[in-house]
Amino acid sequence: MEGNVMNGAESLVRTLVNGGVDTCFTNPGTSEMHFCAALDKVDGMRCILGLFEGVVTGAADGYGRMKDAPAATLLHTGPGLGNGLANLHNARKARTPIVNIVGEHATYHIAHDAPLTADIEGIAWPVSDWVRTSADAVSVAPDGAAAIAAARTPPGQIATLVLPADTAWNDAEGPSPVPRVPAPQRVDEDRIRACRDVLTSGEPVLILLGGRALRADAAELAGRIAERTGALLMSEFAGARTERGAGRVNPERMPYVVDVALAATAGIRHVVLVGAKMPVAFFAYPGKPSLLVPETARPVELAGVADDVVDGLERLADELGAMGCEPRREAAKRPDLGSGDLDIHKIAAAIGHLMPEGCIVSDEAITSGRMLHPYTSGCPHHDWLFGTGGSIGRAVPEATGAAVACPDRKVLCLTGDGSALYTVQALWTQAREQLDVVTVVYANRTYAILHTELLNVGATPGPKAHDMFDLDRPEIDWVEMSHSMGVEASRADTAEEFNEALAAGFATPGPFLIEARI
C-alpha cells in the first residue's frame, strides 16, 4: 500500500472493527500476511494466537457463547480450516456467531494446483451457514460486512469468508457498513394457542428448553408455566449456555443414558419445544429407540431457535394465567467438602463448595462430570457451557475464549485427560494472555466413555479394544506439561489435596491447572 491508498486487507480489518468485531483468534500463514500487516495499521483489534487451529475455533466458540457476538478467526488456507473443523462443528451446533477469515492463494495462482490448493468452500460449507470467496479487492470490505451480518443473524451463525491473497494486497475503496440484521422472529398466535391447548389438556406434558430458553429470564417464565400447569420442565442434555444457580429456575437436565431418559419421561404425551428439538440419543443402540421420550409423545413447538423465546413464553404465560405463579427456584446450598481418596463425587463436592459468584464453567468431563449438577445447582449464579456437537477437544480452548470475553469472571474448565489432549496447546494461549482460567483434568488415564459404550452397543471387548481406549504406556504428566506451557499446576490424589488446590486456583489470578488423579 502506498500513500493513502487502502488495500483489501486493511479495508476488511476496518470493516470488522467498525462492525463490532474487535477480537481475532489467529493462526496465520503466508496467504494471510497482508491481513496481519493491516492489523498493525488499524487500532481496536485484539489478536490472540493459538498454536493449533482447533484452539482458534474453539476459543471463538467460547467467546461467542459468552458475548452473544462474533469474534473473528484467521485460518491458513484449506488445511488450516480443516484443522479447525471439529470445534466449528461444535460451534455451529451451539449456534455461536463466528466470522472465519480463511486465506487463499492469489486468484491467478490457484490454477497451478500448488501444494496448499484446496476446495476451501467445500471444506467450509458443512460447518458454516454462510460462505463467500471475495472476487477482488474492492469486494472484500462489503463481503466482510455481509459476513458480520450473517454471523449476527439469529440465533447466531458461522460465516466463512475466503480471502485470496491478491484481493488482500490490491487496492480497495475503504471499509463498508454492516447491513441491518433481522431481529428474532415473533412467535405467531397459532403456536401460542396450540401450546396452551396441550398444557390445559390434562395429559402429561414435558416443556423442553434449549438455546436462548436456557437463560435465566426465559427459564423463569417457563418455570411459572410449569408451576401453573403441572408440566415437567427439562433442558436439553447439551445446552450451549445455561444460566444456573441459587434463586434461579434450574430445569432438570435430560439424561444422557437412554434408559434413564425414558424412565424420566415415562408417560409424557406432549412435548412443548422452546428453542429445542425433540430429544435424541447421542448414538443408536441395538433394540433401543432414538428419541428420549415415549413413542406416543407428540411435539408442539412454541419457539424455534431463531424465534424470540422470551416473548413467546411471556405470551403463553399470559394465556395460562401463569405470570403470578411463583416458580420452583433452586435453594442456596453448598455441599460439604470430602476427605480421603479422590473420586468424582468429592471433586463435584469441592466444586460446589468453592465455586465463586459469576463463574463460567466449560464442562467436558464427559464420563466423570455427570455427577456435577446435583452438587452445583445451589451455588451462586454461574453459567454452564456444554458440548453441543459431541466433538471432543473443546473445553480447554472454549474456556480460553470465554475468559477473553469475560475478563472480570473466573472460568472453570472441567475436562477428561483424553479430551484435553486434543487441544492442550490452549494452555499456552492462556499463559500468554494471562487468562483467569482454572482447569481441572480428570486424569483417569483412559477414554472412559468408550469402555461404557462398548457395553451399551453390545460389543464384546478384548485386549485390542481396551488397548485403544487406555492412555497409559506412558502415562502423561499434566503438571510437567502445564509448566512447560507457562501454567502453574498441581497434582491431587486425595480429596484434601484437591480441595486445597481448587481453593488456591480460584484465589490466584491467571491460569492454573489441577491434575485430579482418579
Image (cartoon, rainbow, N blue to C red):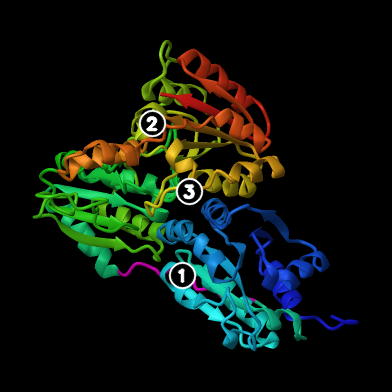
Residue at horizontal 13%, vertical 48%? 268
Instruction: Say what amino acid the circle numbered 1 marks.
Output: Ser
The quadrant holding residue 186 is bottom left
Q: Which residue is mark 1?
A: 128
Which disc, if any, is residue 372?
A: 2
**Is the C terminus in the top left, top right, bottom left or bottom right quadrant?**
top left
Q: Residue furthest right?
A: 3
Label 3 SS: loop
Q: Nearer the viewer, residue 279 or 49?
A: 49
Contact flag, marks 1 and 2 (Cβ < 8 Å): no
Residue at horizontal 64%, vertical 37%? 436
Q: Is residue 333 visible?
A: no
The quadrant holding residue 259 is top left
Contact flag, marks 3 and 1 (Cβ < 8 Å): no
**Nearer the N terminus, badge 3 or badge 1?**
1
From the image, give the main secondary structure of the stretch colored magenta: loop
**Is the N terminus in the top left, top right, bottom left or bottom right quadrant?**
bottom right
Instruction: Say what amino acid the circle numbered 3 marks.
Output: Arg
The quadrant holding residue 42 is bottom right
Q: Position of residue 462 (x, y in %)?
A: 22, 37
From this view, report whether residue 19 is shown above or below residue 93.
Answer: below
Q: Is residue 511 visible?
A: yes
Going by the image, does 221 lie left or right of 402?
left
Label 2 SS: helix
C-alpha span from label 2 to label 3: 18 Å
Which disc, if any, is residue 394?
A: 3
Instruction: Say what amino acid the circle numbered 2 marks.
Output: Leu
Local crowd size for mark 1, using a 10 Å CA cut-off: few (<14), some (14–19), many (≥20)? many
Q: Magenta span covers which residues? A: 178-188
Q: Position of residue 22 (x, y in %)?
A: 69, 61
